[in-house]
Image (spheres, rainbow, N blue to C red):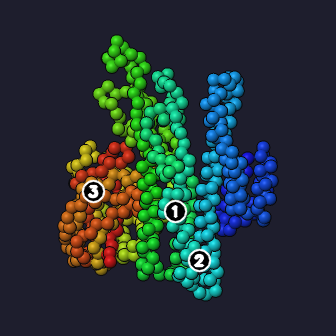
């Protein structure tokens, strides 16, 4: 009966609801025929809506799940053993179908927003081709704005909550742990939301949300080509950015780790010197159920191995953020941050350092590519005992007027890497004769957004460049202490 899957695929990426062709038949041929008869002509959105209504009615009009629960309660002791598995299988199938219908209904509402956004942009392009600009407060403008605003609450990201249970009664005999064991190790579960106790799941509509946001920016650009300079849509763009940051934080907060120690061989006393232990460390995304598990010998002098846990969590985050939809979230958020901040930014083009790790040249800090980064050599502690610094200049023959320094940190798997915890800043004098001390700072980048640090320098300076000396170093995801920078820039903020 899973006839809607092809229809879902049809909607994604289409500007309008178009015919998706015949729905493949399966064991529910009557349902397929009823759906096709209910939608004339057959459209992607129509099939989704009609299919959801018919299937939901079929499943729930007689409260099948409630009836089955009563059957189990009344006849469990009397039902022959060979019949019970059939009943349990039926109950699981009904629960699965109910979850699919829930997903289908949410997906339909989300893709309706995408269609509205695409329609608005298409109408806007038609107006532009006629040599005019789309009008603000028009129907298309309202539809385009309403489409992205539908994602401000979590409604389109909530689905029926999964039950993640431990599949085994004992971890002792396990040699090679599998990801599915994480519920045996981590007690936490996703926090239920709303009266129905649903759970958040970014996979439902995150990629559709990002496309709707991008389409809204395209429509704004058609209405007001100079919107970045004028800042007319700044409030709306900042709301979009806040929405993406909120979803990113929700996703990050859903990643948790834990450990469980197991006695493999007990001596006279379980905690005695002759006992052999194993430690199971797990990290999981509570929202989707994706997890990783690692087994290792339990340290004799510690109850928790932070390095192993950090490595496992980083690996899981890498798997999650490698998904196309999440990988694009950060880049779109960075674009929104720039659209909303039309300050005059001056790129630095020449850089120098006294401590450069092979393959991580200081030129990477001024190449305009956030994916590349400068790095120092590793430090034994968090203190900068080598006097490591980075200096960068505009390369211009005249000074620039600035009141901000922007430091983009190196990012890896969505996490800030080796950003200094405390650092001193200087800028050149107007005649380039000396470095003028500005002060020390502890401001850290916000890894949920554009990953950029804005430092109010307290005054406006005529300068050629900047000098940064980290006093206290930050760590990367593996605990190594470095001084790393992806990009440096100076700005005049208004």
Report the residue at 26% width, 61% height from top.
Answer: 468
How many numbered callouts?
Answer: 3
* Residue 140: mark: 2
Q: Position of residue 95 (x, y in %)?
A: 63, 42
- The answer to which of 27 and 66 lies nearer the viewer is 66
Residue 114 seen anywhere in this rendered image of the structure: yes
Horizontal side of residue 455 vs 82, given as left or right: left
Badge 1, how many Cα within 10 Å: few under 14, some, many 20+? many
Of the numbered discs 2 and 1, the one sitting upstream in the chain is 2
**Of callouts 1 and 3, which one flags the residue occurring earlier in the amino acid sequence?**
1
User: Mark 2 or mark 3, which has the lower sequence index?
Assistant: 2
Residue 404, x across and y down, in percent: 29, 70
Relative to 57, 301 lies left or right? left
What is the spatial separation of the Cα atoms under label 2 and label 3, in whole angstroms? 56 Å
Which residue lies under the disc numbered 1? Answer: 151
Which element type, helix, strand or loop, lies under badge 1?
A: loop
Work out which residue is located at the far top of the displayed protein and give it.
Answer: 268
Q: Residue at x 32, y 54 (%)?
A: 419
Foreground residue, 305 or 488? 305
Mark closer to the observer (2, 3):
2
Q: Position of residue 122 (x, y in %)?
A: 63, 75
Task: Describe residue 20's horizontal placement relative to residue 424 as left or right.
Answer: right
Tell me which corner region of the image, top left, top right, bottom left or bottom right, holds residue 15.
Answer: bottom right
> Which residue carries the number 3 mark?
354
In this rendering, the answer to whether 47 lies above or below 302 is below
In the image, residue 267 above or below residue 68: above
């Amino acid at each position: 009966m899973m006839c809607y899957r092809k229809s879902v695929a049809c909607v994604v990426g289409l500007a309008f609801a178009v015919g998706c062709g015949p729905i493949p038949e399966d064991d529910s041929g009557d349902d397929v025929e009823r759906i096709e008869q209910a939608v004339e002509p057959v459209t992607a959105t129509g099939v989704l809506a009609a299919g959801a209504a018919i299937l939901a009615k079929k499943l729930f009009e007689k409260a099948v799940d409630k009836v089955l629960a009563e059957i189990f309660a009344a006849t469990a002791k009397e039902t022959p053993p060979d019949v019970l598995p059939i009943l349990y299988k039926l109950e699981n199938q009904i629960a699965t179908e109910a979850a699919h219908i829930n997903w289908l209904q949410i997906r339909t509402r989300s893709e309706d927003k995408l269609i509205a956004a695409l329609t608005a942009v298409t109408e806007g392009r038609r107006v532009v081709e006629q040599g005019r600009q789309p009008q603000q407060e028009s129907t298309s403008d309202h539809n385009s704005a309403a489409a992205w605003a539908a994602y401000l609450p979590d409604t389109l990201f909530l689905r029926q909550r999964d039950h993640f249970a431990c599949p085994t009664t004992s971890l002792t005999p396990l040699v090679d742990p599998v990801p599915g064991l994480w519920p045996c190790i981590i007690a936490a579960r996703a926090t239920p939301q709303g009266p129905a106790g649903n759970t958040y799941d970014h996979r439902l509509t995150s990629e559709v949300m990002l496309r709707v946001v991008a389409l809204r920016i395209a429509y704004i650009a058609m209405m007001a080509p100079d919107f970045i300079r004028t800042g007319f849509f700044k409030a709306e763009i900042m709301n979009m950015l806040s929405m993406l940051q909120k979803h990113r934080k929700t996703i990050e907060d859903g990643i948790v780790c834990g450990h469980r120690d197991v006695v493999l061989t007990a001596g006279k006393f379980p905690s005695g010197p002759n006992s052999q232990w194993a430690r199971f460390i797990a990290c999981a995304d509570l929202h989707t159920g994706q997890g990783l598990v690692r087994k290792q010998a339990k340290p004799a002098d510690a109850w928790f191995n932070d390095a192993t846990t950090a490595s496992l969590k980083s690996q899981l985050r890498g798997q999650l953020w490698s998904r196309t939809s999440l990988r694009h979230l950060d880049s779109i958020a960075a674009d929104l941050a720039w659209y909303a901040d039309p300050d005059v930014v001056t790129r630095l083009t020449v850089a120098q350092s006294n401590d450069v790790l092979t393959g991580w040249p200081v030129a990477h800090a001024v190449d305009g590519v956030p994916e590349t980064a400068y790095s120092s050599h590793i430090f034994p502690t968090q203190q900068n005992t080598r006097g490591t610094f980075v200096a960068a200049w505009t390369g211009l023959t005249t000074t620039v007027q600035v009141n901000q320094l922007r430091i983009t940190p190196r990012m890896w798997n969505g996490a800030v890497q080796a950003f200094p915890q405390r650092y001193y800043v200087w800028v050149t004098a107007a005649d380039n004769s000396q470095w003028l001390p500005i002060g020390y700072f502890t401001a850290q980048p916000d890894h949920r957004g554009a990953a950029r640090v804005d430092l109010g320098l307290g005054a406006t300076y005529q300068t050629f460049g900047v000098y940064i000396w980290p006093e206290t170093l930050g760590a990367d995801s593996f605990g190594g202490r470095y001084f790393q920078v992806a990009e440096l820039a100076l700005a005049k903020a208004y």
